[in-house]
């Protein structure tokens, strides 16, 4: 069942329940009021008959012209049956043509005579015995039957009107959702993420449309980045693969190469294979989100920086100094990922620092800054140093893929921080990041 039908049927059911409850309540209330009115009428007639005493008792004449002891005719209206039950059990009919009422105890009750319902009141008669007055309920039944029909038609009409109104409202409510559904199907079939998404209103549907727009924009950005990554990767890999092919062809003629040149070719192959392996590993790091497997935990940046510096000294033989001002403060982050980010910053600084010059790592509670003593970063290159595969004119002569700082940015942003790069006043560059201190 579609959403429109669900809304329409739901409103119809609610309206039907309300109308039915109201109709039943009105019917029962009216029925009780009619019965109460008849009961009051019977009680009043009985009271009037008992009060009408003395000479001239207005009963109807008997066969010989004598009075029969019945109340006056006016005292019985609008009763349809009345009788006097003498102490000896003799029954005297007081209304000609009226039915004989069954003798019963004093009180009000509903009886049936020849299929006709009567409301009967039995009371004491002032001359002894009982006075019984009855009134048929045909008039009440007619009123109630007519009321039942009217209430049924009213409930049915109200339910149908609610269903129609629900359908109309549902069409208005669902129209933006239908547009959004059609747009989603169009995007799925055409793969065109630039398709405009309708956003009507400020309510939940409008919020859903804006959320869908945000999702599609994120998908478009992801696709653009993916295509750019593939294009840049293919471009970056073309050079080492071409060099590998050339050197392999040279090795195919190894018998004709001097020993020194053969050694140079093998060394070049090893270097190119190493760079190609590093490039592939960095591409995998950027293309996947493996960091989600590592939980965040309180981390002291000084400890991570110290471990990175120790490995860098052992690997490069260069001086790497760590200065810390963080005390015991920590940040909540992924330790292995942050260690990778600091290591990339240190490797980048070592690559551009002249031989024999140290690299400094300054650490605070939330910041890590790596300083080198190289040529610095050209002003036009500063906004793009964290871009994937971006390499300045100076960097193109250095080994590397141009992905190291891009990986740093990705890791830091995943941990809720930010990166920056600037030049030192006394020469060299500063590249670092900031994180939020744990509470």
Image (cartoon, grey):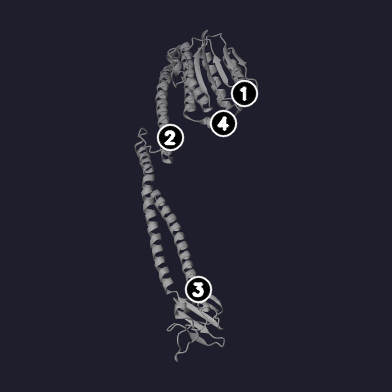
First in sequence: mark 4 or mark 2?
2
Q: Earlier in the sequence, mark 1 or mark 3?
A: 3
Residue 327's place in the image compared with 290, above or below, is: above
- Residue topped by disc 3: 44
At label 2, counting other C-alpha atoms closer than 10 Å, the crowd grade (few under 14, some 14-19, many 20 or more) is few
Residue at horizontal 55%, vertical 26%? 337
The 10 Å Cα crowd at callout 1, few under 14, some 14 to 19, many 20 or more, is: many
Q: CA distance from mark 4 to mark 2?
A: 25 Å
Q: Quadrant of the C terminus?
A: top right
Q: Which mark is residue 215?
A: 2
Q: Tell me the SS state at disc 2.
A: helix
Q: Which residue is mark 1?
A: 300
Name the residue nearer the viewer: 61 or 309.
61
Q: Give the mark, 3 or 4, whose residue is nearer the N terminus.
A: 3
Q: Which residue in the protein does label 4 denote?
A: 294
How packed mark 3 is, by other alpha carbons closer than 10 Å (few <14, some 14-19, many 20 or more), is few
- Assess disc 4: are there few (<14), some (14-19) or many (≥20) residues with their C-alpha within 10 Å of its C-alpha: few
Q: Nearer the viewer, mark 1 or mark 3?
A: 3
User: Which residue is rendered at x = 46% and y = 76% of the image?
Assistant: 135
Give the CA distance from mark 1 to mark 4. 17 Å
């Amino acid at each position: 069942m579609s959403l429109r039908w669900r809304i329409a049927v739901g409103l119809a059911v609610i309206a039907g329940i309300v109308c039915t409850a109201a109709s039943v309540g009105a019917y029962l209330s009216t029925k009780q009021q009619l019965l109460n009115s008849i009961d009051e009428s019977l009680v009043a007639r009985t009271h009037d008959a008992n009060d009408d005493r003395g000479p001239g008792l207005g009963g109807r004449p008997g066969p010989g012209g004598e009075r029969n002891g019945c109340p006056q005719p006016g005292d019985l209206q609008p009763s349809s049956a009345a009788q006097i039950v003498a102490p000896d059990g003799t029954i005297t009919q007081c209304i000609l043509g009226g039915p004989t009422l069954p003798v019963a105890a004093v009180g009000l009750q509903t009886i049936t005579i020849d299929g006709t319902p009567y409301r009967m009141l039995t009371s004491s008669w002032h001359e002894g015995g009982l006075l019984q007055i009855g009134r048929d309920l045909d008039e009440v039944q007619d009123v109630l039957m007519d009321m039942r029909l009217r209430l049924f038609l009213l409930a049915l009409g109200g339910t149908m009107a609610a269903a129609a109104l629900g359908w109309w409202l549902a069409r208005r409510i669902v129209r933006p959702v239908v547009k959004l559904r059609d747009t989603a199907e169009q995007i799925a079939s055409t793969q065109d993420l630039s398709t405009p998404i309708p956003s009507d209103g400020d309510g939940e549907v409008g919020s859903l449309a804006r959320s869908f727009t945000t999702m599609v924009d994120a998908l478009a950005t992801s696709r653009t980045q993916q295509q750019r990554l593939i294009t840049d990767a293919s471009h970056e890999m073309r050079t080492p693969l071409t060099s590998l092919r050339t050197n392999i062809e040279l090795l195919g003629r190894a018998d004709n190469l001097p020993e020194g040149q053969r050694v140079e070719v093998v060394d070049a192959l090893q270097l190119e294979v190493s760079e190609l392996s590093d490039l592939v590993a960095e591409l995998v790091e950027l293309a996947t989100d493996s960091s989600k497997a590592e939980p965040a935990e309180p981390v002291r940046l000084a400890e991570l920086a110290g471990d990175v510096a120790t490995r860098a000294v052992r690997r490069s033989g260069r001086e790497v100094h760590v200065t810390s001002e963080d005390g015991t403060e920590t940040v909540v982050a992924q330790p292995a990922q942050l260690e990778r980010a600091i290591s990339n910053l240190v490797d980048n600084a070592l690559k551009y620092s002249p031989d024999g010059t140290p690299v400094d790592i300054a650490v605070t509670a939330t910041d890590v800054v790596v300083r080198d003593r190289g040529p610095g970063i050209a002003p036009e290159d500063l906004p793009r140093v964290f871009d994937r595969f971006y390499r300045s004119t100076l960097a193109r002569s250095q080994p590397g893929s141009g992905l190291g700082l891009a990986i740093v940015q990705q890791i830091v942003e995943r941990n809720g921080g930010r990166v920056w790069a600037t030049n030192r006043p006394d020469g060299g560059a500063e590249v670092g990041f900031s994180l939020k201190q744990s509470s």
